[in-house]
Image (cartoon, rainbow, N blue to C red):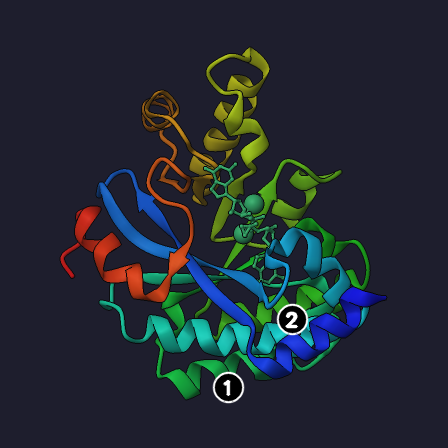
């Protein structure tokens, strides 16, 4: 297919970029990290969303090389930030299948000099759908490095709760589909409240994704959610904007 060829040459041509979206801690009231989000600047078609190209990159196996690039790039960038600012990187389940994921993470940390506790790896439930035992072993090895592990898009899979029992996650990211209708829909209120309560009682940080309004923010703060991310603060921006974002949202920097 067209996109396959385009993707392969895009990687060779350096048409991928990483953008960074702030993670805002509600107790500290400031940015404490950024999520790295991949962007493809297609020479003719313009920006292509990762939602469109990541599945193709996974199919053709390119995600392994691309994911390695993302890790190195994100760690190298974060090493230049103040030391209390973390970076979150998304991992594809296909990267777990490659088997040398742990070495790739070790190498990215070594190459950048980034302290492992400043790296958060975001995984989705799909990591547990196949090769569960092998993938759990990899997760434990990653965590033993001092890296933090977040459960992304929480609540959208089939049996999220059992995954919380099988691995000691550091963070739960509440899917933005629940946050979106928080103010209008009582069911979303109940779900987000339950997830933040779960996080509190299991000692797992909770992050609400897709926060777009002050009303959502106020509600999340009142419910004891720990962290927020969303367009209310900022969409993902190029690395050159990090300093500005840190100035705007109350970090020392
Ligand atoms: O902004 P947004 O359109 O950036 O991202 C869409 C989806 O693509 C999200 O589900 C996000 O987790 C995923 N994504 C973004 N960057 C990466 C990446 O570097 N690696 C992987 N595996 N997924 C990513
Ligand atoms: O699946 P993951 O959570 O990694 O992906 C993050 C996705 O959410 C990216 O596509 C990012 O651009 C998008 N996103 C981040 N903040 C908001 C927001 O406030 N509103 C909406 N609609 N999307 C957001
Ligand atoms: Mn994510
Ligand atoms: Na998500």
Q: Tell me: is circle 2 under 8 Å from ligand 1.
A: no
Residue at 63 percent across and 35 percent down: it is: 155
**Percent position of residue 81, x then y:** 26, 69
Front-most of residues 179 and 146: 179
**Percent position of residue 38, x then y:** 54, 62
Which residue is labeled 1 in the image? 107
* Disc with the residue nearer the chain's start (2 vs 1): 1
Which residue is labeled 2 in the image? 138
Horizontal side, residue 240 vs residue 253: left or right:
right
Please tell me whether residue 188 is drawn above or below residue 226 in the rendered image. Answer: above
**Percent position of residue 4, x then y:** 78, 70
Q: Residues within 10 Å of mark 2 (few under 14, many from 20)?
A: some
Front-most of residues 240 and 46: 46
The C terminus sits in image quarter: bottom left
User: In whole angstroms, how far apart are the C-alphas of marks 2 and 1?
Assistant: 15 Å
Horizontal side, residue 253 vs residue 40: left or right:
left
Residue at 32 percent across and 45 percent down: it is: 24
Please tell me whether residue 82 is drawn above or below residue 13 in the rendered image. Answer: above
Q: Residues within 10 Å of mark 1 (few under 14, many from 20)?
A: some
The N terminus sits in image quarter: bottom right
Circle number at residue 143: none
Instruction: Please identify, in this view, whether the residue under mark 2 or under mark 1 is nearer the observer.
Output: 1
Q: Are marks 2 and 1 in contact (CB under 8 Å)?
A: no
């Amino acid at each position: 297919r067209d996109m396959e060829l385009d993707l392969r040459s895009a990687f060779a041509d350096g048409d991928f970029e990483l953008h960074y979206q702030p993670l805002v801690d509600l107790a500290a009231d400031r940015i404490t990290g950024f999520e790295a989000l991949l962007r493809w600047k297609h020479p003719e078609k313009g920006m292509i969303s990762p939602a469109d190209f990541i599945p193709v990159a996974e199919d053709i196996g390119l995600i392994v090389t691309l994911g390695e690039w993302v890790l190195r790039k994100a760690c190298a960038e974060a090493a230049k930030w103040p030391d209390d600012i973390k970076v979150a990187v998304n991992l594809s389940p296909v990267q777990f299948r490659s088997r040398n994921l742990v070495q790739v993470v070790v190498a990215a940390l070594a190459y950048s000099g980034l302290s492992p506790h400043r790296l958060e790896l975001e995984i989705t439930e799909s990591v547990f759908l196949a090769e569960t035992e092998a993938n759990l072993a990899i997760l434990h090895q990653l965590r033993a490095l001092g890296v933090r592990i977040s459960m992304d898009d929480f609540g959208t899979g089939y049996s999220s709760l059992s995954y919380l029992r099988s691995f000691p996650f550091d963070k739960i990211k509440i899917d933005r589909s629940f946050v979106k209708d928080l103010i209008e829909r009582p069911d979303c209120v109940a779900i987000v409240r339950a997830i933040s309560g779960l996080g509190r009682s299991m000692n797992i940080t909770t992050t609400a994704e897709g926060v777009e309004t002050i009303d959502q923010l106020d509600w999340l703060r009142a419910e004891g959610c720990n962290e927020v991310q969303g367009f209310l603060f900022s969409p993902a921006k190029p690395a050159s904007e990090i300093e500005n974002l840190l100035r705007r949202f109350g970090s020392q920097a």
